[in-house]
Amino acid sequence: MTVAGAKDYVNKQVGDNREQIEYHMKEVLKLIGEDVEREGLLETPARVTRMYEEVFAGYSVDPRDVLGVTFDEKHEELVIVKDIVYYSQCEHHMAPFFGKAHIGYIPSGKIAGLSKLARLVEAITRRLQVQERITSQIADILEEVLQPHGVMVVVEGEHLCMCARGVKKPGSKTVTSAVRGQFRQSAALRSEFLSLIRE
């Protein structure tokens, strides 16, 4: 994965099955009508396999572990990390989708390093996914590991399975949210979070 300051994860299972994946990728190319012997495609199965090591790296890490060491801190006010760029693959069509995640939480005595929130997003998105699950998983893992007073996550996404095929509506965005704890109880807190991520 390539996030500034984050560890580089790769999907080890892809590496272990490199020959089989390359073979099957070559077969898919044949089945869609391509000439797998033409120059531009000779290395495509190997390139796709190397790409899979990276874009599916989330399978090689437990998202809970990427939060790493947490710190005891008395700060109990809103913490937000916004505009965390992510790339994922739709599990329905294996087409890319991408966008930004915005995370807010109110600590209850325990905080995570800010870069760890970006790592968490990477670990969850670098696998076959749906946006709704990404949003819930980020919130649920933060709630489980940090036990904050509240968590709110908003994820924006542009889905190529909707822009480039099917209804073909480029530029359309999907927005999902997950609300936990005090954010669920307080409309003012939700409004504060939404206002700050729009600034």
Image (cartoon, helix red, strand yellow):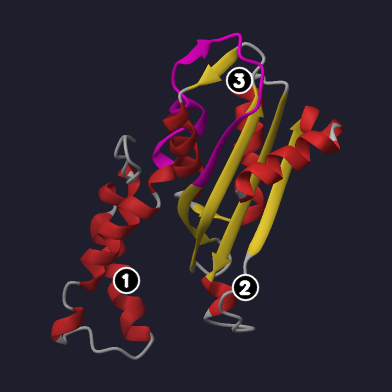
Q: What residue appears at the point 32 percent right and 71 percent down from the top-left corner?
A: 25
Q: What is the CA distance from the residue labelled 3 to the residue labelled 2?
A: 34 Å
Q: Closer to the camera, 144 or 108?
A: 108
Q: Nearer the viewer, mark 2 or mark 1?
A: 2
Q: What residue appears at the point 46 percent right and 38 percent down from the top-left corner?
A: 118
Q: Secondary structure at mark 2?
A: loop
Which amino acid, mark 1?
Met
| Stretch of the chain drawn in magenta | 59-83
Residue 8: image quadrant is: top left
Q: Nearer the viewer, mark 3 or mark 1?
A: 3
In the rendered image, residue 198, in percent from the top left (x then y), is placed at 63, 50
Residue 111: image quadrant is: top right
Circle on res. 118: none
Which residue position is annotated with label 2? 172
Q: Earlier in the sequence, mark 2 or mark 1?
A: 1
Q: Earlier in the sequence, mark 3 or mark 1?
A: 1
In the rendered image, residue 155, in percent from the top left (x then y), is placed at 61, 51
Cβ atoms at labels 2 and 1 below 8 Å apart: no
User: How packed is label 1: few (under 14 Cα within 10 Å), some, or many (20 or more)?
Assistant: some
Which residue position is annotated with label 3? 146
Which residue position is annotated with label 1? 25
Q: Secondary structure at mark 1?
A: helix
Which residue is outermost to the left?
A: 39
Residue 30: image quadrant is: bottom left
Which amino acid, mark 3?
Leu
Which amino acid, mark 2?
Ser
